[in-house]
Image (spheres, rainbow, N blue to C red):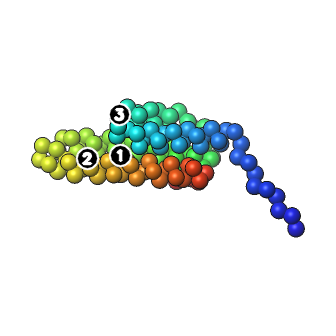
Amino acid sequence: MTTLPPALPDQREEDLRTLAMIAHGCMAASFLNGITFFIAVIIAYVKRAEAAGTPYESHFASVIRTFWIGFVLSVIGILTSVIFVGLFILFGTFIYVLVKAVIGLIKASERKPL
């Protein structure tokens, strides 16, 4: 019995994989300059429909979900920072977004959905 070599991913999926990795990388880099998180969510919203049915659909959905959760938690953290609770919320948000970005990068590099 002969085994066939694994099928090569098509160019569309490779492009989506690259964009998913860029979006996750932008999420991680947002702690250095902030604006890259907006770039990540724009990429995710633009490519979400194109990624339907591929492993990268979950990556773009995760970037969008992480953005909105991070945004809401950051606003709450900033508003409550005067009573120092906000500092813990902001730190937790930092860890949450960083972990989601790293997991996303790892899964995208392995060509697996989240």
| Residue that badge 2 annotates | 90
Amino acid residing under circle 2: Leu
Against 11, residue 94 (above or below) is below
Residue 33 image label: 3
Mark 1 nearby-residue class (10 Å; few <14, some 14–19, many ≥20)? some
| Residue that badge 1 annotates | 69
Q: Position of residue 78 (x, y in %)?
A: 21, 41
Q: Earlier in the sequence, mark 2 or mark 3?
A: 3
Helix, strand or loop under label 2:
helix
Left/right of residue 6 with respect to residue 20 in the rendered view = right
Quarter holding residue 71: top left
Q: Earlier in the sequence, mark 2 or mark 1?
A: 1
| Of 102 and 47, the residue lying toward us | 102
Amino acid residing under circle 1: Ile
Mark 3 nearby-residue class (10 Å; few <14, some 14–19, many ≥20)? few
Marks 1 and 3, how far apart at CA:
19 Å
Q: Position of residue 33 (x, y in %)?
A: 35, 34
Mark 2 nearby-residue class (10 Å; few <14, some 14–19, many ≥20)? many
